[in-house]
Image (cartoon, rainbow, N blue to C red):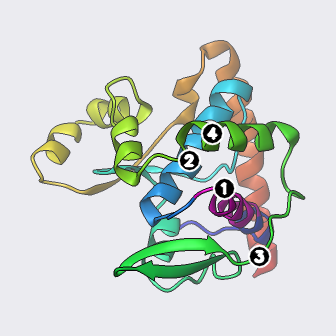
Amino acid sequence: MCKFSSETKDKIGNAMIYIAKHTDMLSKTKLIKLLYIMEEKMVEHHHTPFLAIPYEIWHLGPVQKDLFADLSDQLFLMQDYLEPYYVESNKYFKARKEFSDDEFSQQEIRIMNEVLTEFGECSATQLVNYLHRKDSLWYKTAQKNGVLEWFNNGLCNSTDIRIDFGELIDLEHREAYYDSLAIHTTSNDLNAAYNV
């Protein structure tokens, strides 16, 4: 289980609020996929993490398991940021409060806007299909780790194999990305320990 510091949780929560404010009929799958795409785009364009949270290879694409669990059940981690509602027994999310940009750089706001402009109107199924394309990081990681066939044959629906976003960028910039990720991770871990 991932332990989010209050600062990391606040940034994730406000990213979710931003998505909810700019997206209709926001399902769990759509929300998780949009956050993932924002992480990919931030790494690709700026060689730095967006939320710096781990994603794993699951059958329906990349998943952050703690957020998946929280959004699947009664909200606990994100209860201050999102509010569930139902349409014909389907669960969707809306923002519980206004977006705060305190934790975000201008580059991050730009990435969020670009992703929502390109993918905000997509259905959850369309996002899953986009992330399953053969040149995607999810596909390459699943193939490299020998689980793609398991997924395709219905033998497995989740793994603990983490996605390495560093593989999105060239070797020249990869070390700087890993250094930045290490700083984010260490800061989160220290703050989470202090918040206990």
Q: What's the amino acid at mark 3?
A: Lys
- Real-space CA distance between mark 4 and mark 1, rounded to the nearest whole angstrom: 9 Å
Q: Point out the tag, 4 or 1, that comes first from the N-terminus.
A: 1
Q: Which residues are magenta?
A: 11-23
Mark 2 surroundings: few (<14), some (14-19) or many (≥20) residues within 10 A: many
Q: Residue at x 32, y 51 (%)?
A: 60
Q: Which residue extends farthest right?
A: 102
> Which mark, residue 97?
3
Q: Nearer the viewer, residue 177 or 10?
A: 10
Q: Nearer the viewer, residue 86 or 7?
A: 86
Q: Nearer the viewer, residue 157 or 182?
A: 157
Q: Nearer the observer, disc 3 or disc 1? A: 1
Contact flag, marks 1 and 2 (Cβ < 8 Å): yes
Contact flag, marks 2 and 3 (Cβ < 8 Å): no
> Which mark, residue 120?
2
Q: What's the amino acid at mark 4?
A: Thr
Q: Which residue is mark 1?
A: 22
Question: Callout 3: helix, strand or loop?
Answer: loop
Contact flag, marks 2 and 4 (Cβ < 8 Å): yes
Quadrant location of the C terminus in the rendered image: bottom right
Q: What's the amino acid at mark 1?
A: His
Can residue 153 be seen in the rendering of this structure? yes
- When the figure is inspected, residue 154 is found, relative to residue 12, above or below; the finding is above
- Give percent across and percent down for residue 110: 77, 38
- Give percent across and percent down for residue 78: 63, 76
Q: Which residue is mark 4?
A: 117
Q: Residue at x 46, y 46 (%)?
A: 122
